[in-house]
Image (tube, coloured by chain):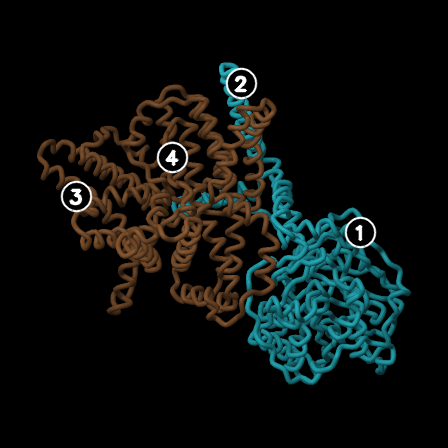
Chain colours: A brown, B cyan
Amino acid sequence: MVFSSMLFVFLFLAANLATQFLIRDVRKKNIAMLAFSLVFYGWAGPRYLLLLLLMVAICWIGAILTERAGADRTARKRMMVITVAACLVILGIFKYLGFVLGTVKAIIGVPKIIPRIVLPIGISFYTFQLISYVVDVYRGEVPAQRRYWKLLLYASLFHQCIAGPIVRYKDVAEDIERRKMTLKEISAGITRFTVGLAKKAILANGCAAIADSFLTGTTETLAKVPAMGILLGVFVFTLQIYLDFSAYSDMAIGMGLMCGLHYKENFDYPYTSRSISEFWRRWHISLGSFFRDYVYIPLGGNRRGDRRTLINLFVVWFLTGLWHGASWNFVLWGLFFGILIALERFPLKGKLERIPDPLRPVIVFLLVMLGWILFKFTDFALLGTALKGLFGLNHNGFANRAVGLAIRNNWFFLIVSLLAVTPFWRDLRRILANLSKRSAVLYWVNGAWEVAQPVLLLVVSAMALAGNSYNPFLYFQF
Amino acid sequence: MDKEKRKRTNGWIRAAKIGAFFLALAIIAFIGILWFARPKTSELEKRTLTKFPKLTFSTFWNGEFFSGVDTWYADTFPTRESLISGSKWIESHYGSRDEQVIGEAIIADEIPTGDETEDQEPTAITPEDVVPEPEPEPEIRLPDTEGLENGTVYALGEFKGNIYITDNCGYELYYFTKASADRAAQGLNEIYDAIGDKVEMYVMIDPNSAGVMLDQSVLDSMGCSNERDAIHYVYSQLNDGIHKVNAVDNLIPHNAEYIYFHTDHHWTALGAYYAYQAFCVEKGVMYHDYKTYETMEFPGFIGTFYSYSNQSQALKSNPDTVVAYVPKGTNTMELTERNGSTYSWNIIQDVSGYSSGNLYLTFVGGDQPYAWAHNETITDGSSVMVIKDSYGNAFIPWLIDHYEYVYWVDFRYTSNTVSQMVADHGIQDVIFSLSIYNGTTDSVTSYLKSVGQ
């Protein structure tokens, strides 16, 4: 099930919220929430549910045994490593076995047959959540959860189970045990959820239609797209991937708020960053902080000299790329950012400030756009064709009527989408809120808008979703 | 407003917001569970909507059942078409949409040249072009007839291109593929090998509005192919014994007239008339003047381009008028539906009161596997069989006043072979009326092969 489907919004979520509001006891709320979450996850096929139950069981037992080892640091570490390794082996089998064997086959010709393993939905997200839980128990930052079903609730919570944010157990443990639903948070959650829904149903899906008209097809069709078409396609795809992914996080955070669960922010307008390092502090924050806390810092971070820092950086960016998909283009994409960040850290350190301030976000945006081309095409022939096309090396001219018409037909939509990836709407809202403190008329206008906006966005999103029976989020593939 | 009062009012605003949101959610959720109000077909999209999936252990286990429920729920949501219309209205404000291309880029092959016809400018047919031939002696047979009922069907087999919209008119873009065109020609040649010694065989490839109305520079800018060149290429690959009806060259000079619908991929009866003129020239008989025919008019036609362009508002606000010319000899036909039922029907049916997307059904009862008409005002036993797609529907009425018996089959829905039908009815002339895609691509080669056996 996806958040941006009619069935989810108007049946599943409506029923889920009804139970959360009608049930007063937190334990019963949790049982209901677990039931909803298991149905949500099982919707993609109950067979995947068994794997989730198994991984939670492994981490549940592993964390309890880690904690029981008490002061014996070696035993604690051994138990933690075994549990994390078990999780990584399962992730490796389901996500990377085919990819590794395919690569080996390409080099040495064997094995002849590569098993086709279907990727269980959301496995990368919930595996990382469970790993963070086990490591946090090992570090003594959080007590081990004694009840299996509560850990299962944490891992399977439908708000964030299959596309993030990667929520740390310690961040929601208290909410799971004791939570209160307040009018203020329900109200904020409604706004956040409906903004996310509209962002996905209207803006992200609209961008997808434009980007796909230039960036899909075979190498032959792609080679026919002029440079301006590729550029427009990649530009719109850049908007789409942010709008799509941040919309999912908005909806997750919004639904959490409505139920008294608090998830951390996952995006902070990354396309306005002034350096690549800053971009990654503001893009998919929960993933970046996971790699920082559980890989980069344990490897020594930047405390063991420049050479080791460089190695640590590339390990992290190799893994970041690989996490996004079992394909070499994702590794390339990760390393592309690894190189850019290494350049910022070492040869360009202190020099970036010399670039005029307004120019820096533009340069970062263009580099990120280039990165999304690597991300978009898992097929290297298509990737090569697109990169050549971007620089006019496919010899098919600069632009054609289709490109001109795509811009003409969508100029207003593109401006709104571009503004949506910046803090423009948030700032406008704040300015209006401030002005309304001084003017009674503006106060009532603002109040009326506050009441009408979620309903308006819900109805408009329903309209957009009605014609799109299937529109999964981009990040579901991870 | 003091701070305390403002705080209280903020609380009320918040409560009103929560109340309004949950009321809206509850209303839409309630509409969603009204199972009896769920539509089964879509008038806009001209298709049967998704059915509730079958539950088996395998579909349950692999999740197909659940994804099917998801699709079914959204696809058959009550008020879905109103919701989509609302969404399309919003989309029409995304930018300037007086001109647009809908669909993904397709690659066209270069069309091989060499046929001298391509170098000539197309010219309109005049009565002097017609050289009459002596009429043959036909054999006459009649099928059975039964009662009458509406046989509405939707068929868009010839609709495959992208859509270009400009000045409130839709155009289906055409992309030539040589290998496919060769296979189409081969299929027609094989049919000729089977029946050529028994009948006169005519092939008429019908261009669409993009091929007749759009300037070559517009087509070039979108990488489309020249339909006239494509048709002449296929004709150049056909056996010499096959009559090639040069409809395209008689349509282009008339392209200032209302010969194609603006909201639909078909030609109008007037467009079909100019193709009929070309047929008469090829056959060597004098065509009738369309101005002498009684007409029926059906305004408010919003055709296939509307749904295929994601409900372009430009098209919706500029509907077509279907004008039909009633044959003089007879307006009665007998048809056999896909389920085998047979009915009497009108060649030009009064479709007033039909939905706005179905007015093209005025012509010969739409796409039926088999139908025929007997014109009792002609008693020479002459007969023709038209093997057609839906372009042929507007063309067939013009033949009624030239033959005593007119038979037609929609090759997409018939299982009978041409040679069998020719033998069964003692046919003298066989006309293949194929739209540009069916006449030059291999998407229907299998159909042509099956009817050619």
Q: Secondary structure at mark 3?
A: helix
Horizontal and vertical percent position of residue B255:
77, 67
Same-chain check, marks 1 and 4: no
Same-chain check, marks 2 and 4: no
> Which mark, by number, is residue A82?
3
Q: N-terminal of the two: label 2 or label 1? A: 2
Whole-number angstrom distance, CA of label 1 to CA of label 4 = 53 Å
Q: Secondary structure at mark 1?
A: strand
Whole-number angstrom distance, CA of label 3 to CA of label 4 = 28 Å
**For the residue carrying disc 4, how many other residues have a C-alpha within 10 Å: few (<14), some (14-19), or many (20+)?**
many
- Tag in front: 3 or 4: 3
Same-chain check, marks 2 and 1: yes
Q: Is residue A175 left or right of residue B224?
A: left
> Between residues A163 and B16, which one lies in front from this camera angle?
B16
Q: Are marks 2 and 4 in contact (CB under 8 Å)?
A: no
Q: Which three-letter amino acid code belongs to the residue tagged 1?
A: Pro
Residue at left 55%, top 60%?
B104
Q: How many marks?
A: 4
Outermost residue, right side: B292
Q: Which three-letter amino acid code belongs to the residue tagged 3?
A: Ile
Q: Which residue is mark 2?
A: B9
Q: Which residue is mark 1?
A: B299
Same-chain check, marks 3 and 4: yes
Q: Which residue is mark 4?
A: A37
Residue at left 74%, top 76%?
B246
Whole-number angstrom distance, CA of label 2 to CA of label 4 = 37 Å
Horizontal and vertical percent position of residue B109:
57, 74
Q: Secondary structure at mark 2?
A: helix
State which chain disc 2 sits on.
B
The quadrant holding residue B278 is: bottom right
Horizontal and vertical percent position of residue B203:
70, 75
Whole-number angstrom distance, CA of label 3 to CA of label 2 = 57 Å
